[in-house]
Image (cartoon, rainbow, N blue to C red):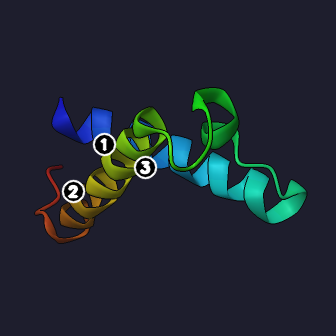
Amino acid sequence: MMDTISLLLVIIGAINWLLVGVFQFDLVSWLFGGQGAIVSRIIYTLVGVAGLWCISLLFRDKKN
């Protein structure tokens, strides 16, 4: 369950960075009131923690 949630948050973060890189548009910031808004900061933090969690996916034994 945690893997799925983390993967979804990382995908959201990747899409946001794609928008920033291509269009200079930060969707999270726009939706939640700026980069300094508490909700935006919580989302950025959750995406970052999810990214750290997903690092563990690289080192797990693969089940066949």
Q: Secondary structure at mark 3?
A: helix
Q: Which residue is mark 3?
A: 44
Q: Residue at x 42, y 36 (%)?
A: 8
Q: Which residue is mark 1?
A: 6
Which residue is painted at 57% across and 30% down in the image? 32
Residue neighbourhood size for the residue with mark 1, other residues' Cα within 10 Å, grouped as few (<14), some (14–19), many (≥20): many
Q: Is residue 61 left or right of residue 52?
A: left
Q: CA distance from mark 1 to mark 2?
A: 7 Å
Image side of residue 11 versus residue 42, left or right: right
Q: Are marks 3 and 2 in contact (CB under 8 Å)?
A: no
Residue 63: image location, x then y, percent = 14, 51
Task: Identify which residue is drawn at 13% across, 63% down.
Answer: 60
Which label lies toward us, 3 or 2?
3
Q: Earlier in the sequence, mark 1 or mark 3?
A: 1
Q: Is residue 49 above or below residue 30?
A: below
| Element under disc 2 | helix
Q: Position of residue 37 (x, y in %)?
A: 49, 39
Tell me the residue that label 2 is attached to.
53
Q: Residues within 10 Å of mark 2 (few under 14, many from 20)?
A: some
Asked if disc 1 and disc 2 are in contact, CB closer than 8 Å, the reply is: yes
Q: CA gap, disc 3 to disc 2?
A: 14 Å
Q: Secondary structure at mark 1?
A: helix
Separation of marks 1 and 3 at Cα, in angstroms: 13 Å
The quadrant of the image that shows the N terminus is top left
Farthest-out residue, right: 23
Which is more N-terminal, label 2 or label 1? 1
Circle 2: residue type: Trp
Identify the disc placed on residue 57: none
Instruction: Give amino acid for label 1.
Output: Ser
x then y, percent, for residue 56: 18, 64
